[in-house]
Amino acid sequence: MLCNLASPVGWGRQWFVPREVNPDASIDNAHSIHFVGICGTAMASVAAALKERGAAVTGSDHGIYPPMSAFLEERGIEARPFDKANLAQRPDLVVIGNAISRGNPEVEFVLEQKLDYCSLPELLKHRFLRGKRSLVVSGTHGKTTTASLLVWLLEHNDLNPNFLIGGIPNNLGQGARFTDSDWFVIEGDEYDTAFFDKRSKFIHYLPEAVVINNLEFDHADIFGNLAEIQTAFRRLINIVPRNGLLLVNGDDANLQPLLGIDHCPVRRFGLGSDCDELASQLMFSESSSEFRLGDTTFCIPMSGELNVRNAIAALLFARYAGLSDDQIQSGFDTFEGIRRRMEIRGEENGIMVIDDFAHHPTAIRETLKALGQRYPGRRVWAIFEPRSNTTRRNYFQDELASALRLAKRVVVAEVARLEQIPAEERLDPGRLMEDIRSAGTTADYLATTDEIVTHVTAQAEPSDILCVLSNGGFGNIHQKLLDALGR
């Protein structure tokens, strides 16, 4: 039996409201633009930039609260709760955020009414990146630090770069800026673009030059294995032009299979003898790291080998942009760090609280190593919140234990939303505690932020370092620790 496609039960034109199409509207020149998920840092920054350029901008989200709500309000952009009524005026273009999925009322309306829509990376490509000299900073770890360093090197030397990065450099006070400069520094995330475009975001970024700091398995919710991630990076490498540059960590074995190419210049950097740009004579102190590259010695105001690698990538890009080594060192000397990257949040009674974004085992290991180098002789606590889609799973069961054992005391918070993960894939907290304790490290698994604060402050001693490791807010545990220690 044939269906009546015009019946009122849901098919056909019964619910489709035709609109007058603006023949001049496209991603490139849409005037009225609506952002679904506008309170994301990148979404809000781009929305504000478009409004400054004369576009009529609206937006919606489910979590509308400071600081992003204040950021938007200051720029005359109202963020409303999700509702198809927000699209009643039929904007020229709807930008759908990466965190938005099917079932969202505005997404369903966009699809039903055949409104023009795109992802944020697509919008960036068409409205901001085309015609610019795009420097894409990618890799599993160190993207934000490397991009922030590079932006500051260019800014400090009057190149006024565009930038869009996933953190906030203290020198600049914001994670995005759009200028008339030819240079555009952008953090290249391998995460997928949108629910309708499962390619990595960095595929849209029109790279002139790319750095790949390292490559490991991550994002277990969208990648099945390391090979799939390598495929994503291979696609990025494939679009580097022949007059561009590919900078890669020459010490990373996972990158080697991707480098059998001849369509663009390739430079390997690192600490190993096979690297084109070889760093040597590494020295670490409480406040800095020093290394030699070629005939020049550089000093950066950060500790740890990972940060040395990040700095090498940034300075090689800065040389590519035309800066001298003296200009680069001057930029390093004035770099003030990045929020949530070994950020000192405060100190009470001789006990320091540090905030760090590390959540992958490698990042945790490197952060704890760097803290040991920076504060020799002080007892380091690792207070870890397993909340990412990868660390909530057992893929890194052994690696997490190995990384956290570098601390003298370990506290792990209850695994976030564990019920959402199939039982056979879940991180085993009990085994994690056993594995950490087997090396002689004290470890505790506590359910709530308040329990952790009570436990830690009862046992912390003067000169201890409390390092909070999380890619989320962790219940404002940093301030709670400082308040409790102050009492």
Image: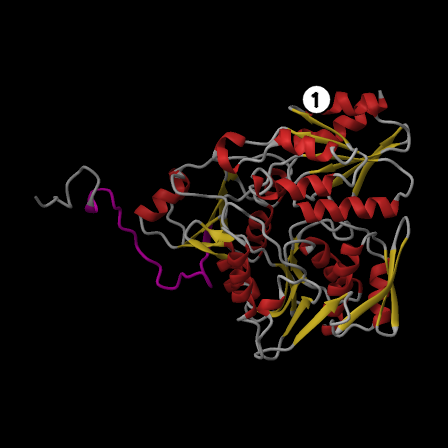
Using the rendered image of the protein, determine whether residue 88 is visible from the camera's viewpoint: no
Point 12% across, 44% down: residue = 3
Does residue 451 sit above or below 23 in this rendering? above
Query: Around disc 1, counting alpha carbons within 10 Å, would you say few (fewer than 14), some (14 to 19), or many (20 or more)?
Result: some
Secondary structure mostly seen in magenta is: loop
Does residue 163 sit above or below 397 in this rendering? below
247 sits left or right of 419 in the view: right
Does residue 460 sit above or below 371 in this rendering? above
Residue 409 appears in which quarter of the rendering?
top right
Tell me the magenta residue range.
Answer: 12-33
Is 282 covered by the magenta stretch? no
Residue identified by numbered label 1: 450
Does residue 336 sit above or below 459 in this rendering? below
Is 14 covered by the magenta stretch? yes
Q: Quadrant location of the C terminus?
A: top right
**In front here: 283 or 68?**
283
Residue 192 lies, in percent from the top left, at: 50, 53
What amino acid is labelled 1 in the image?
Asp
Residue 79 lies, in percent from the top left, at: 52, 39
**In front here: 396 or 411?**
396
356 sits left or right of 471 in the view: right
